[in-house]
Image (tube, rainbow, N blue to C red):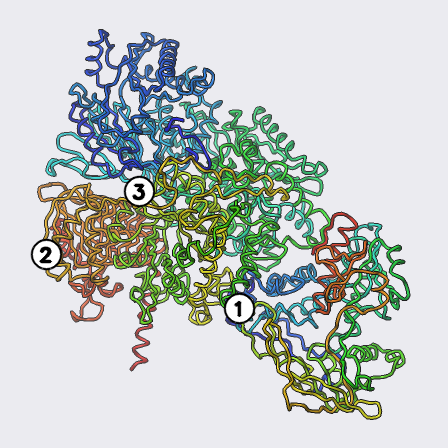
Amino acid sequence: MGKVTGFLEISRHDRTYEKPEVRLKSYDEFIVPLAAEELNGQAARCMDCGIPFCHNGCPVNNQIPDWNNLVYKEQWEQAVINLHSTNNFPEFTGRVCPAPCEAACTLNIDDNPVTIKTIECAIVDRGWAEGWIKPIPPSHATGKTVAVVGSGPAGMACAQQLARVGHAVTLIEKQDRIGGLLRYGIPDFKMEKHHVDRRVEQMAAEGVTFRTNTDVGTDVSIDDLLAEFDAVVLAGGAEWPRNLDVTGRELDGIHYAMDFLTQQNKRDAGDDEATAAPFGTISAKGKHVVVIGGGDTGSDCIGTSARQGAASITQIEILPKPPVKENKAMVWPDWPTKLRSSHAHEEGCERDWAVLTKNAVGANGRVTALDCVRVDWEKTPDGRMAMKEIPGSAFQLKADLVLLAMGFLGPRRGALLEQSGVALDPRGNVLADTVQYRTSRDKLFAAGDMRRGQSLVVWAIREGRQCARAVDLFLMGTSTLPR
Amino acid sequence: MPMHEVMRQGLYDPRNEHDSCGVGFVVNIKGRKSHDIIAQGLKILENLDHRGAVGADPLVGDGAGILIQIPDALLNDWARAKGKSLPAVGRYAVAMCFLPRDPAAREEAVRFFEQVVAKEGQSMVGWRDVPTDLTGLGKTVIETMPVIRQAIVASSLSIRDQAAFERKILAIRKQILNNLPAMAVKRNIPGLTEFYMASFSTRTLVYKGLLLATQVGTFYHDLRSLLTTSALALVHQRFSTNTFPSWKLAHPYRLLAHNGEINTVRGNVNWMYARRRSMESDLLGPDLNKMWPIIPHNQSDTACLDNALELLVAGGYSLAHGMMMLIPEAWAHDPLMDPERKAFYEYYAALMEPWDGPAAIAFTDGRQIGATLDRNGLRPARYLITDDDYVIMASESGVLPVPEEKIVRKWRLQPGKMLLIDLEEGRIIDDAEIKQKLAREHPYADWLKQTQFKLEDLAESEERRALPRRNDLEALLHTQQAFGYTQEDIQFFLEPMARLGDDPIGSMGTDTPLAVLSDKPKLLFNYFKQNFAQVTNPPIDPIREELVMSLVSIIGPRPNLLGHHAGNHYRLEVTQPILTNTDLEKIRDIDNLAGGAFRTQTIDTTWPADEGAGGMEAAVARICQEATEAVLADYNILILSDREVGPDRIPVPSLLATASVHNHLIRQGLRMSTGIVVETGEAREVHHFCVLAGYGAEAINPYLAFETLEQIRVQTRLNKTAADVKKNFLKAIGKGIMKVMSKMGISTYQSYCGAQIFDAVGLSSAFVNKCFTGTATTIEGVGFPEIAQEAVARHRAAYGENPIYRGMLDVGGDYAFRLRGEAHAWTPESVAKLQHAVRGNLPEEFHAFTKTLDDQSERLLTIRGLMQFRFVPTPVPLDEVEPASEIVKRFSTGAMSFGSISREAHTTLAIAMNRIGGRSNTGEGGEEADRFLPKPNGDSERSAIKQVASGRFGVTTEYLVNADDIQIKMAQGAKPGEGGQLPGHKVDKNIARVRYSTPGVGLISPPPHHDIYSIEDLAQLIHDLKNANTKARISVKLVSEVGVGTVAAGVAKARADHITISGYEGGTGASPLTSLTHAGSPWEIGLAETQQTLVLNSLRSRVAVQVDGGLRTGRDVVVGALLGADEFGFATAPLIAAGCIMMRKCHLNTCPVGVATQDPVLRKRFTGTPEHVINYFFFIAEEVRHLMSKLGFRTFNEMVGQVGKLDFRKAVEHWKAHGVDLSRILFQPELKPGEGIHHSELQNHHLDKALDQVLIKEAKEALENQTPVRIEHPVRNINRTVGAMLSGEVARRYGHAGLPDDTISISLTGTAGQSFAAFLSRGVSLYLSGDGNDYVGKGLSGGRVVVRQPAVAKRNPSANIIVGNTVLYGAIAGEAYFEGVAGERFAVRNSGAVAVVEGCGDHGAEYMTGGVVVVLGETGRNFAAGMSGGIAYVYDEHDQFRKLCNMSGVELEPVGLAELGLADEPGRPRQRGTSVDDNGMGDPLRFDAERLRILVERHLLFTGSTRARFLLEDWDSALSRFVKVVPLEYKRALLELRAEASAAAAAAE
């Protein structure tokens, strides 16, 4: 374990950000890593709990106390090995994960969790810097072929795991680059894309074949894939965005968040405007931006808008403002609902809660404002929360650009789903369990958001890994892949 | 089925019976025979009556008997009447026969007897019917009474002398008795096995039987006949743990009677058996071969010892010599022992492994009579010598009324010492003389010099074997994986051991599945649970009493036990059994190094990987075969080696290889011809080494552990050399092995080796019988195929392709939860759900919690998980089921001391339990007196259960009278057989106050209760506590292991009101991980065995049975009830309800939720409330009610013991658990009509007979009005615990403060029984003229006790014993003056009393934490061991105290002269104390001369001591001879407190 009394002697100290005025000038990452000696101290705070709630709080079940201890003892290389035994891409989660592990940390009972995410990120960054992270090609080929459709975190993790045990894996992506949401959903300032490129390179060396610009269902039929491969994994994500069903929705200047974010990511990747925005540029520059939706995507829109030079940014959320501090007794070690502020909020933004958008107001076909009303949430007799408008609370928000970041409803409806004919669950996701990951169709598997609905990168990695084991078992009868 | 042959049924196994007892003899030194001696012997027996026991039927005792010299006149009288003539004395022998009741069997027995006598050339004189009188015998006794006849056999003319005839009749007896079982089967006469010979000798005759002490004389007419005379009478009264009537099991045996227990008997018998081929005797010649087995199976330990002694004597050793070989004194570490005697012992150490355990043994062959004590002095034996040549020896003083003026010496047997009376020489031979004579008989030292090789002295082998090189880390990793190393092995075991040299500590309990239920491949070691001593014998403290411990191992063949020309036998000795690689190479090359005395053969214990799991059984056969061949080819050291492990070779589990070879060679009679050394990569933690030792490894080389240590050293940049790391590891393992041995009360590795002191849990009997012959296994389980699969799985992890094992060891997960690791009951989900449920009062959430534990269809955790209920078709309506508010009254919380958990947590539990009518438990460590009174809001923080543990911290009379239950903690589930330690940093001012100790000084709880070394001692403590608080139930807490049921039966007979059976899963604040995981068994096994045994013995209804240790859900409660529990203890679960999150950091004081910590900052984080705990218990009770309804029970009592409602769910799907069979646990013993199977009646404690009833009456004025009273009475040894009940009355009325000094002044004359002046409250003074027995002043709580020699006696008090062993144990306050010498362990664990004595035995002032002890004469060895507080002054006349004192924690100072200054100066001692806790002793670091003078003056005042007068007459020169003993820690802490106080004073100014 770390230091017995570390948590009593050393206070929590996390990574810091560049100041907003500096970081707003570019789309680069702006987290300032901790110095090595400071990391050592932070790792020493870990108590190596008899029951490490963090280890269970983490969807990929990172063996957090173990690598904290290794960092404390400066056995970095061993820490890299340990970390990778549960997580294919710790540098992704070390940057973009909301860190449910830290919510579950024993020291979070007192609001001072170990800086687990920071340590994770430091371990893997160190691993890359030292050259310890290398391709792990299989010792022999099984002769089996697998196609993984969708190259987001689930697809990548699944493909990597399968390749490492010797299957010939083809990772198929409809976009021009590998990475899915990692690539085009997450802004560079949260995670620069060379992290993804590096993994693509590693996977290529491990034998993964990449097929980009291939929209399964359109460019190639699912039946062809099933004929060509011994198994096919659907990992296409949950890209069907929730719409704003109000009068004026058709006005120009109202966009889905993902359309907005993708453009910027492509620009950052060096694409020219025609490639980056084939259907026209969406820009926040000089505009009054309203972001509808209070989640992470909303934050990404705020940060991107700020960097583009928005005149003002307002974020509204239909749910009430959550408490600043949760009731630890009843919630810990579970993920709490509480007020969270992201770095984007520091970059200049108004926030409002319990606001319902009634309709969009426009002029000349362009949006100019939103009509809103405040709502109250009450518990109904059957225990659900219901919303009620507050009379006389209507107001108008000035809006030149409205970004819809209200979540996703499930996998995109379209050719792929239709052709495959797989059964869906009541929520509209592809039906498969978390042991076998098999869809209703033979040889066809599903994992990640496509199966579980919109979720975190870390959940996608978990599902990709577990699905890989299921596929391996299906193909070989036994599997050494961990779940 | 005859009652006395109750065969193994269910979990009951007669092998587990224990007994212990009172023993005594009276002898005329000059050999003058008289009938009177027999009468006196019988009188002794009557006066030892209270040391025996009666079972369910008050007319049935456990047996008693007497051994006398052959009554020649009586027998001649018979012969004359029958018209026969008897040969001369010495030419005939008498066999005391218990013949079968069945006439046909009897006829056959008689015929067979006569046939063997004839075959051996001797002649029958005739059969004499022994006249008996059945008056007063119980029905069951009469029903089982054998036909008792004496066979008189005359010696043939060819027999040259009496000794030769004795040898012949031994051969006859052996041949007859050993062949009975086979004949019984062959001739189909089962009754034949009942035939038994109590004695068969030319010199002695034994009259014994299933009789009460008082009945021996009336039952046997012979004993009343004036023709019956003897110069000696050896008597014995038995207290056994069972109540199955047995005539055979009464003592004395042929040569001895025994009070105590041989812990190593399993190993001793095995080793004896193994000698079959290596033993020859000139004297016995071919007769020796007819005598096998020398020690038959299924006998009591005493009978086995008797057989061994009989063999040695027949083989030509003298009686005393034989006893010294069997029970040697602790010679190895005694600096005062003369070298010749040491050489004697060292020489015989290679011939005979010690028979180890607490023992007072009286032995006689009719010519000599004597007694000896075990090396630890764990049983009492007092003797006196009269001026008319009598010696009377007994377990107690005062067993015969002898006028004081006739007594010339009163003394005791001392540890390891012997008393011998030679009737032919007509004198007493003392220990020194006997031993010196024997030690000089042969040149033992020279023989040793010539034949003994010490491994450490041998030169290093030049021929270094090329070892497989592991030059890279990857290869090392693979090897580690092949032996199942986990990250936890490194992190929790090897690294801490390398750093600190200690067996690592952990906390909370084990909540992982048994090895057989685990999905993981477990090491074979994990299927073995360590046994431990509880009740029937004491564990030892291997640290504080190191002088009796020894790790010496002798490797290689053993000499012929009966060869007397043994100076030419070579032996190889190691100082401890763990070999470094260099050591092992020496052994491998020993042929060259030791001049050809030894030859070593290495046997490969791996098998080809391509054979898979199927190859292992054949490999084991091959290994055994190679072992035989090697031994026959004269290789006398075998190395079982798994060095060949690699991608192509799988190692056989080292334990399997070792035990198989060991048992195989024993079966072949070859084991004594060779040594077994194990070279294995597998062994790494203490438990591994212990199991290997237990199954025959004489030495072990853990090569991979050494390599791993080096890897750790380098990788973690440990600031230590490679040699230091190795040394630390060896030290840690050595200490650990000693701890494990000592848990069982075994002190030498030699007798531990091969003793098989383990229970197998989860192994099939077929497998166990083959490879671990003789080990108990109760639930069946895996065998060769599964054990092989586990080995293969480890091998695959090492050399297969699993990515998880690429570059990394398996995570383990046994000691902390890990997802990929072992399964746990407490998981993140279960803890979170439980806490959310009790905090929000959410039944649904609680149900979700219990579901995670109860539904074990997917994940096996516990034995009960394999059980299912037999529900009734129509459930009882829920509203007709007993309400939850009644059920919760059966619940209590576990014993967690204030000290291990915070006051907040402790009081939360207490308030909760008091509100619901359950019980909370103080744990060991006292309770703040303010908690005894209710709070203004009506809540009470008083713990209903007051625990009495071995440390006796805070056990005042006031504490005891504030109890509803008083629980004697015999053992704790997490660390049975071990003591505890509260580190100094946890002893803050509050803790120190309630424990009557010094802040900042660590506290030690000894492993044993020093007043419980056997079952009759426990009965005594129960009696003591019941006296102190007549209203409380007395409870005894035991830990589950095979045999706990028979112990529980004994405890019930010892009159406990309540018995707790704890499972090994139970929690702890700190315990070695070795014990946490590997000691004790699941509660299901122990509880079921207890229920079955109590029912079989008709004892069940008079005790309440509680179960605890890992209870979590309502289902657990119901399973427990059906298996026989009335009540239920919970510890971890309610603690979790109150906020514990299973950090397992209790031992570090860093509990982040304020539960298990004394840190004021962390304590603030405690958020638990009584409501949380109450919600938990009501949730549980509701679950119980639902199950009761489905099972068809309306009341809880109906449910208790209804094991028929449980069914066994076979885990067919599980690769290991599929072999488990619970039928023995679910066995329902046949019920006699009217037999209760739950608690329904009260014990009779016989308090009405107590002398205190009279004292209380006479002290009425003092009790009610504080008016001083004076009382006078005679007292006898049968008056036990005098003063305790009276003191209870004082404490009830006046609390700990008591009455003014001497308010109740009681003068007594005579010999007081045990526990004289126990728990004496302030204001009560006992003045005894006479002597006291053991436990005088136990728990003294402020009273005064004085024992002085009667004026008529002319003995020198300083050379005579006045009080027995373990005097002032746990004394808290008060004063004691003894005019004479005290026995062993004087003032052990004294917390505050002052005492003056004129001499004391071994281990004086042991574990003392406070108070003042003055010894005006000699002390024994090991004075001040573990002493951490208080001071002692010793009058060191001969300047040898330094050698006798254990200097590890104390320093010696001169006393100095009186200090000048004012009389009322602060800290200056005063003549009178001012309160109960102040004896006027002042500042312990100053004023020694004043203090000492006050105490010596008081001693003179109270006792009239001549010695005190003599010292005071020349006080200045006396002062110069006194030495002050002061503990270092205590001094440091006092100086710190002083500095703190003066700083505070300065700040105030």
Instruction: Look at mark 2 in the image and give the residue it sits on.
Output: B1269
How far apart are labels 1 and 2 at the CA level? 63 Å
Instruction: Look at mark 1 in the image and give the residue it sits on.
Output: A6
Q: Are marks 1 and 3 in contact (CB under 8 Å)?
A: no
Q: Are marks 2 and 3 on the same chain?
A: yes
Q: Quadrant of residue B1019?
A: top left
Classify mark 3: helix, strand or loop: loop
Name the mark nearer the viewer: 2 or 3.
3
How far across and down, in percent of the image, does residue B1459 sit? 19, 66
Drawn side of residue B48 relative to residue A317, left or right: left
Task: Please state the chain letter of the residue tagged with numbered disc 1 in the rendered image.
Answer: A
Q: B1388 or B1343: nearer the eye?
A: B1343
Instruction: Look at mark 3 in the image and give the residue it sits on.
Output: B1054
How far across and down, in percent of the image, does residue B962 sit? 28, 59
Three-letter code for the amino acid on which mark 2 is drawn: Val
Give the quadrant of the N terminus of chain B.
top left
How far apart are labels 2 and 3 at the CA level? 34 Å
Q: Is residue B1139 visible?
A: yes
Residue displayed at 68% across by 60% down: A86
Q: Quadrant of residue B281?
A: top left
How far across and down, in percent of the image, does residue B511 sit? 52, 53
Residue B688 in the image: above or below residue A172: above
How far apart are labels 1 and 3 at the CA level? 51 Å
Classify mark 1: helix, strand or loop: helix
Q: Are marks 1 and 2 on the same chain?
A: no
Drawn side of residue B36 relative to residue B721, left or right: left
Q: B23 or B859: nearer the eye?
A: B859
Classify mark 2: helix, strand or loop: strand
Give the mark, 2 or 3, whose residue is nearer the N terminus: 3
How far across and down, in percent of the image, does residue B394 sit? 23, 35
